[in-house]
Image (tube, rainbow, N blue to C red):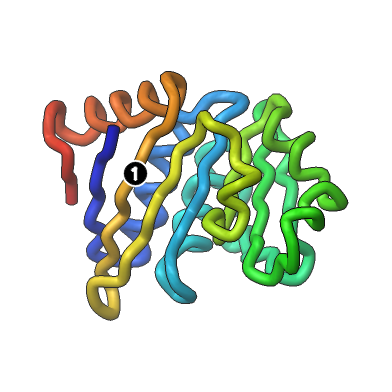
Amino acid sequence: MELTFISQSPRETIGCGKLLGSIVQPGSIIGLVGELGAGKTCFIKGLASALTGVAEDDVTSPTFTFLQEFPAAIPLYHFDLYRIAALDDLRDLGFEECVYGAGVTVIEWADRAEAALPPECLTIHISVIDENRRAFIFKARGEKHTEIIKKLKQKTGGGTDEWH
């Protein structure tokens, strides 16, 4: 199942992340794919804010640490795999413990770890349209993440496969 969101601004991208953060459940895995500057971290600011209550400004790309954890009733594990050298490095990061744990795991540059992703996850492909606008294509694998897309559709206008 797929759903497309067109963001007109960084503020709308954060709002989209907040909407998803209000829907995800423990054990949700969200993979983000997109070029540098596409809006992955901006999206996560909203997700983390809604899910854990953390201030948007406290969310940064963990490029040099690979992982940021935001403790809460449902913890958020934020991986940035931009600089990952090999899939074996994920083991040292505690990747499996997070992905198969009770929190929500969000992975920037998820395409670099495609083989390590579980069969059930939500992948969001982000494309740059122009300086401010971005296209977010949500693709669900598995029943749990398909339900997330169905809830997003309900909250954004019902039966449509695209919202702005």
Crowd class of label 1 (few under 14; some 14 to 19; many from 20; radius 10 Å) = many
Name the foreground residue: 16 vs 57.
16
Q: Residue 40 at x, y = what percent?
A: 48, 61
* Residue 52 visible in the snapshot: no
Residue visible at 78% across and 64% down in the picture: 65
Query: Residue 5, position in %: x, y?
Result: 25, 50
Q: Quadrant of the N terminus?
A: top left
Residue occupied by mark 1 = 138
Is 14 left, or right, of 59 in this rendering?
left
Residue drawn where x is 56% and y is 58% of the image: 108
Apparent side of residue 49 relative to residue 58 in the rendered image (left or right) = left
Q: Nearer the viewer, residue 43 or 2?
A: 2
Seen as rendered, the residue at the extreme front is 115
Could one spot residue 135 in this view of the protein? yes
> Residue 34 appears at what percent x and percent y?
43, 65
Please give left or right for residue 110 compared with residue 162 in the image: right
Which residue occupies the extreme bottom position in the image?
A: 131
Horizontal side, residue 138 vs residue 69: left or right? left
Q: Position of residue 116 (x, y in %)?
A: 65, 44
Name the residue: 29% across, 65% down. Answer: 134
Element type at marker 1? strand
Which kind of residue does numbered mark 1 sit on? Phe
Q: Nearer the viewer, residue 163 or 144?
A: 144
- Picture quadrant of residue 132: bottom left
At horizontal 37% and vertical 22% (from top left) the residue drawn is: 147
